[in-house]
Image (cartoon, rainbow, N blue to C red):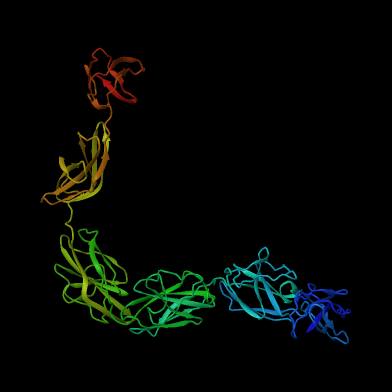
């Protein structure tokens, strides 16, 4: 069997002694020491041993002694086999040429030329340069995800520890500059020795969103089922194209999400509801197919930077195109409002066409349809637009959903129909089945043109006032009153001027208003018994302390008070023109009946006091 001695720094200089059994340990310096610094690392059958516990960059010398025996062995000490070997020290050539590729919103790839170390670590830091230096003998834990990597120093993380010259770093923040250092090293565990001179350094920002959006959205090669969308590029690395049928794109792409594009509409990633990704392009055009004829498609083009975790510029540039063919969905909810004697407003809910044509006919339903590629001139003055068939006039031909028609005959029914169609330059294709239809009757010409109508409180009454600018064969005004604004009762009548082209003023006093909200309206009646109601006015009536008073006063002061307002201690006072009190009495009933025959004729003030309430009325004594 062999006994192996090892000595650091110089040759083995002591031999084993016969009849002495030595303890061996492959951990250098733990076995028996012979002489000074000569340690037994092996004394068993075999021909190899792995030695640990060595120092880096040190030359170790070895001597091998054959021996026989166990507890009292005998050694051959003449000409033992000898050798020496230096352990690895710190590398001498650092890494270099640090570059970056596949830079994204949350990741990037680092590439470099390796030095002459057996391994290397990469230290990363966000926002400022790396200045941490690894310590020999420490094997640092690493993680390729920056946010999870252990810190070698505050904010400085070990993101790589291996033998390669490239790796992908993840867990980064968008739009952030990251700084790096690469340290070569030799050894393992406690024997690790780092090369800290001239490490490879560099920095790279993760991507940010572009700042200039695409523009000039346009379309070409439009068919019934396909189209080509084009644009002018912004300053992104690429752009995402999203399409939606019938209505505008209403959801934007989300940062750091990579979407799947498919030129067949509906097959790519869906953003929100109905917004499909049809292309990711670094160019200026994209084709889309799988479309439905006669349908309007809306597009949004978003500039973006990045690949697997992109950042988008929002909102996108937008445009729309209609595929060749008649619309698929007709307009609906056609209705007439704001009806007068000679005008009315038509409204509807648009269908899927890019335009619509409205026909109107007097007296009976619209009975003609527009035809494809027809030329139709619209005019909202009834009877002035193109006539289809007999009496069907084009009153609207545009992309909106409302039109006000003029030039109508009073008290006459008009019918209308709304047709969806798609316009393609000089060509057009109509959807003529089941157009949205409706009708309305114009109002009669009113006998009165009312300028104003209002109500105001007046001396425990409500006074109504109104004025007219013009009257034609007007007969009278019925004044109607309501407590709920629904059911009305006539409370009076005022005669009208008959025929007038100048302003006429009228008034009426409601002697019995309620202590609540009172509603009033005028029924304007002409000599043929035709009538129309005025707008409704409302007033909240709150009676005062005095409900009625005889003024001027002769022999007796007669005052009717608001009985509900009388409180204990209520009183009335009468002052002369100098402010002197000439009468003062308690109020014990709602009626004041006081002889003032002896008072000098002239001006007096009557003050009513009920609790905190006060009311002063000027009186004239005859």
Residue 534, compared with residue 378, is above or below; it is: above
Residue 196, compared with residue 478, is above or below; it is: below
For residue 364, say whether it is visible: yes
Q: Position of residue 586 (x, y in %)?
A: 28, 17
Query: Is 288 placed left or right of 61 in the picture?
Result: left
In which quadrant will I find the N terminus? bottom right
| Number of numbered markers | 0
Q: Kindly indicate the quadrant of the structure image that contains residue 160.
A: bottom right
Residue 593, compared with residue 89, is above or below; it is: above
Query: Is 154 placed left or right of 489 in the picture?
Result: right
Q: Position of residue 60 (x, y in %)?
A: 82, 79
Q: Position of residue 174 (x, y in %)?
A: 57, 69
Query: Is 367 placed left or right of 101 in the picture?
Result: left
Observer-nearest of 134 and 491:
134
Residue farthest top in this picture: 598
Observer-nearest of 4 and 567:
4
Q: Kindly indicate the quadrant of the structure image that contains residue 343.
A: bottom left
Q: Position of residue 196 (x, y in %)?
A: 76, 73
Observer-nearest of 387 and 569:
569
In which quadrant will I find the C terminus? top left
Observer-nearest of 470 and 19:
19
**Residue under the point 28% across and 67% down:** 349
């Amino acid at each position: 069997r062999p006994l192996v001695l090892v000595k650091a720094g110089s040759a083995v200089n002591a031999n084993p002694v016969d009849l002495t059994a030595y303890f061996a340990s492959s951990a250098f310096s733990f076995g028996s020491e012979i002489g000074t610094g000569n340690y037994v690392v092996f004394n068993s059958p075999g021909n190899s041993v792995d030695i640990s516990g060595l120092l880096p960059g040190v030359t170790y010398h070895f001597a091998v002694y054959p021996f026989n025996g166990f507890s009292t062995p005998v050694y051959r000490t003449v000409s033992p086999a000898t050798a020496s070997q230096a352990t690895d020290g710190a590398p001498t050539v650092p890494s270099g040429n640090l570059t970056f590729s596949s830079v994204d919103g949350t990741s990037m790839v680092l590439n470099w030329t390796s030095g002459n170390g057996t391994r290397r670590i990469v230290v990363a830091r966000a926002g400022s340069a790396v200045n941490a230096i690894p310590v020999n003998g420490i094997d640092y834990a690493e993680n390729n995800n920056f946010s999870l990597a252990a810190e070698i120093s505050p904010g400085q993380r070990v993101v790589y520890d291996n033998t390669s010259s490239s790796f992908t770093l993840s867990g980064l923040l968008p739009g952030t500059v990251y700084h790096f250092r690469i340290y070569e090293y030799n050894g393992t565990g406690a024997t690790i020795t780092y090369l800290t001179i001239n490490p490879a350094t560099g920095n790279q920002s993760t991507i940010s969103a572009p700042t200039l959006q695409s523009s000039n959205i346009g379309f070409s090669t439009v068919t019934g089922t396909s189209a080509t969308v084009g644009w002018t590029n912004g300053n992104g690395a690429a752009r995402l194209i999203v399409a939606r049928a019938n209505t505008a794109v209403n959801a934007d792409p989300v940062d750091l999400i990579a979407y799947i594009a498919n030129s067949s509409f509906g097959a790519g990633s869906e953003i929100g509801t109905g917004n499909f990704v049809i292309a990711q392009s670094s160019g200026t055009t994209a084709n889309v197919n799988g479309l439905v004829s006669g349908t309007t498609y809306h597009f949004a083009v978003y500039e973006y930077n990045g690949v697997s975790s992109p950042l988008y510029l929002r909102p996108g540039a937008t445009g729309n195109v209609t595929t060749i063919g008649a619309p698929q969905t007709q307009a609906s909810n056609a209705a007439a409002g704001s009806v007068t004697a000679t005008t009315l407003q038509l409204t509807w809910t648009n269908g899927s066409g890019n335009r619509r044509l409205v026909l109107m006919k007097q007296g009976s339903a619209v009975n003609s349809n527009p035809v494809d590629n027809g030329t139709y001139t619209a005019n909202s003055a009834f009877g002035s637009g193109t006539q289809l068939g007999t009496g069907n006039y084009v009153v609207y031909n545009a992309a909106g959903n409302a039109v006000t028609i003029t030039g109508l005959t009073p008290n006459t029914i008009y019918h209308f129909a709304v047709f969806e169609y798609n316009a393609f330059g000089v060509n057009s294709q109509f959807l003529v089945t089941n157009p949205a239809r409706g009708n309305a009757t114009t109002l009669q010409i009113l006998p009165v043109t009312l300028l104003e109508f209002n109500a105001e409180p007046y001396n425990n009454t409500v006074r109504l006032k109104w004025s007219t600018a013009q009257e034609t064969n007007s007969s009278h005004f019925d004044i109607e009153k309501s407590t709920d604004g629904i059911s009305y009762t006539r409370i009076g009548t005022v005669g009208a001027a008959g025929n007038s082209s100048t302003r006429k003023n009228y008034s009426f006093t409601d002697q019995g208003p309620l202590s609540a909200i009172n509603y009033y309206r005028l029924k304007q009646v002409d000599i043929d018994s035709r009538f129309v109601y005025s707008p409704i006015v409302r007033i909240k009536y709150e009676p005062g302390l005095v409900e009625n008073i005889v003024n001027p006063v002769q022999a007796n002061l007669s005052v009717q008070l608001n009985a509900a307002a009388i409180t204990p201690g209520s009183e009335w006072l009468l002052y002369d023109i100098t402010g002197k009190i000439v009468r003062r009495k308690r109020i014990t009933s709602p009626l004041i009946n006081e002889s003032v025959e002896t008072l000098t004729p002239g001006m007096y003030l009557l003050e009513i006091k009920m609790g905190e309430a006060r009311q002063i009325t000027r009186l004239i004594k005859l």
